[in-house]
Image: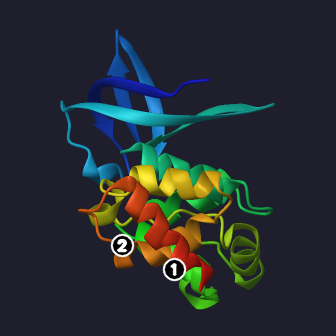
């Protein structure tokens, strides 16, 4: 199993890129190959799918994108080839929001995602995704981990973070968060 690979992009095709590392060209299927430039050195996070008749590498710009992909392919009826196009735009937060709000129509706009699969995505992932709010993510890492260890769901934690003062001590942040969560 591979975690990531670093190398030089030697080919960009409509559905994949070829990354050369130590004289070997790896064909890696990516959501948007045109984000990569020829002869550019890059680090690509990988997911390897092995089946009877194929060994395929799927690539991602960052770990968060890979994590979302892994959650999507855990959904019954949603395979790698259906999940990858969902990551093609800069719409990760929109996907999270659609799942949490139950927006079937938003999910159906992606290729090969019909009503049944969209509803299955919502059923399987609602309440299980962590929304990344970059402004709060850095400041509240310790608070988030503390609240998770107390058994609170990531969705509930993310909901109250905007109401927490980042300048307070962790102890005071936990007290404030617990007051908000218990309301």
**Which residue is most to the top?**
22
Label annotation for residue 164: 2
Residue that label 1 marks? 180
Q: Secondary structure at mark 2?
A: loop
Q: Mark 1 near mark 2, Cβ–Cβ under 8 Å? A: yes
Question: In this image, 34 relative to 59: left or right?
Answer: left
Q: What's the residue at 57%, 77% (across, down)?
A: 181
Return the residue nearer the eye: 168 or 151. 168
- Where, by quadrant of the figure, is residue 8 drawn? top left
User: Which residue is nearer to you in this view: 163 or 83?
Assistant: 163
Where in the figure is residue 32, as x and y percent of width and height? 37, 55
Counting residues from the start of the chain, the first of labels 1 and 2 encountered is: 2
Residue 104 visible within the image = yes
What residue is drawn where x is 35% and y is 16%? 21
**From the viewer's perspective, is residue 31 above or below residue 129?**
above
Residue 94 locus on image (x, y percent): 44, 77
């Amino acid at each position: 199993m591979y975690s990531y690979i670093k190398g030089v992009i030697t080919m960009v095709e409509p559905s994949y890129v070829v990354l050369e590392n130590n004289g070997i060209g790896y064909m890696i299927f990516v959501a948007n190959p045109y984000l990569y430039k020829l002869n550019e050195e890059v680090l690509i996070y990988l997911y390897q799918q092995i089946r009877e008749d194929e060994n395929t590498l799927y690539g991602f710009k960052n770990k968060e994108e890979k994590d979302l992909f892994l959650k999507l392919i855990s959904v019954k009826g949603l395979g790698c080839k259906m999940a990858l196009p969902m990551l093609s735009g800069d719409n990760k937060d929109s996907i999270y929001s659609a799942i949490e709000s139950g927006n079937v129509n938003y999910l159906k706009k992606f290729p090969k995602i019909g009503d049944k699969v969209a509803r299955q995505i919502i059923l399987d992932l609602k309440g299980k995704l962590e929304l990344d709010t970059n402004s709060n993510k850095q400041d509240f890492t310790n608070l988030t981990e503390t609240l998770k260890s107390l058994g609170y769901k990531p969705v509930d934690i993310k909901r109250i973070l905007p109401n927490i003062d980042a300048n307070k001590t962790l102890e005071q942040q936990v007290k404030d968060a617990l007051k908000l969560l218990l309301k």
